[in-house]
Image (spheres, grey):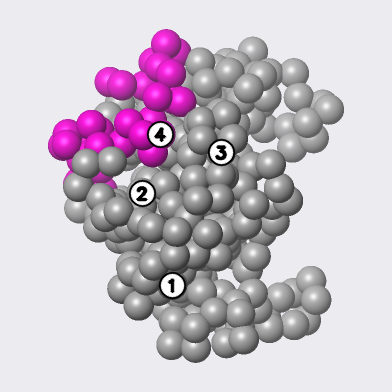
Amino acid sequence: MAGARAVKASVAIDGIPITNTDKVWFPEDGITKGDVVRFYDHIAASITPWLKDRPLTSERCPDGLAGQCFYQKDFPNTRAPADFPRVTVRASSTGKDVHYLVGGTRRVLLWLANSGCIAMHVMATPASRLQEPDWLALDMDPITGEFADAARAGLALRALLDEHKLRSFPKTSGSRGLHIFLALKPGHTCEQAVAFATSLGEELARRDPKLVTMERSKAARTAPVYADPFRNAYMQTIVPPYSVRRRPHAPVSMPLEWDEVTPKLDSAKFNIRTFDKRLAQADPWKDFTKSAVRLPK
């Protein structure tokens, strides 16, 4: 990868020990843990703004795709460096405190990657305002597994948002779907975000019931794309732009221009081995924060 630091079998980067870099994480491609760490180090300036002040969940695969993977939310001082920022939240389901790491620094990013984290999942709310989202996201999740279906649904959503004069920003999920984000002005609640996202999905389903469904039960769905509004609920998470995903070929959740979103787009072409070419292009989300909107009632 051009411009990236070389990672040996065991080194320290920015004071973070990086170990077992030769361990293969993506067997089909021979992509190692060192390759993933090197990628995150290389793109730190691009991804850390999307992690800054965000409580995060780590999707850990210490032995790569061939091993066991799990999600980790709780990072007390005994499980991560004590100087890393955290926010403590009482879990309603257990009544216990959960110590979320808060992202936004290169050291936290590299430590997570070294601990086996392939994908990062962040909240729509900053740690400083856990009840107040500063973005809204809809996950166009294709039941068929076909990105083409997600693209068609995403384009229909864009048209609907344009009717409301709300600027939207698409990105590949890095998996099989399409994420559509809106930057929000201060003053919204998670409940308002979920309600508005639900109303958008319901309108899409009304206009094209053969394409979009709002049925939460997978067994009951009769359309190929579920417009998931619940990534906006309190304490729920979504992968940020530029996160690697736990799928073959190490795909990356990639910000897009709307004119790139077509049913013919191969979202798998955005991966850690092709990222340098993409990074050389203009950032399609550079105006994201400046485009913050207030949701209509």
User: Considering the numbered disc 2 on the image, is that residue within a helix, a strand or a loop?
Assistant: helix
Q: Residue at x 74, y 37 (%)?
A: 216
Residue 276 in which image quadrant:
top left
Where's residue 214, x and y in %?
67, 32
For label 2, the residue is 39
How many marks are shown on the rendered structure? 4
Main secondary structure of the magenta stretch: loop
Q: How far apart are marks 2 and 1 (CA)?
A: 16 Å
Q: Distance between the residues labelled 1 and 4?
A: 25 Å
Q: How far apart are marks 3 and 4 (CA)?
A: 12 Å
Where's residue 179, x and y in %?
46, 37
Using the image, tell me which numbered label, if any, was put on residue 214.
none
Circle nearer the N terminus (2, 1): 1
Circle nearer the N terminus (3, 4): 3
For label 1, the residue is 17
Asked whether 47 or 205 is in front, the reply is: 47
Q: In this view, does 31 lie above or below 153?
A: below
Q: How far apart are marks 4 and 2 (CA)?
A: 10 Å
User: Considering the numbered disc 4 on the image, is that residue within a helix, a strand or a loop?
Assistant: loop
User: Considering the numbered disc 3 on the image, is that residue within a helix, a strand or a loop?
Assistant: strand
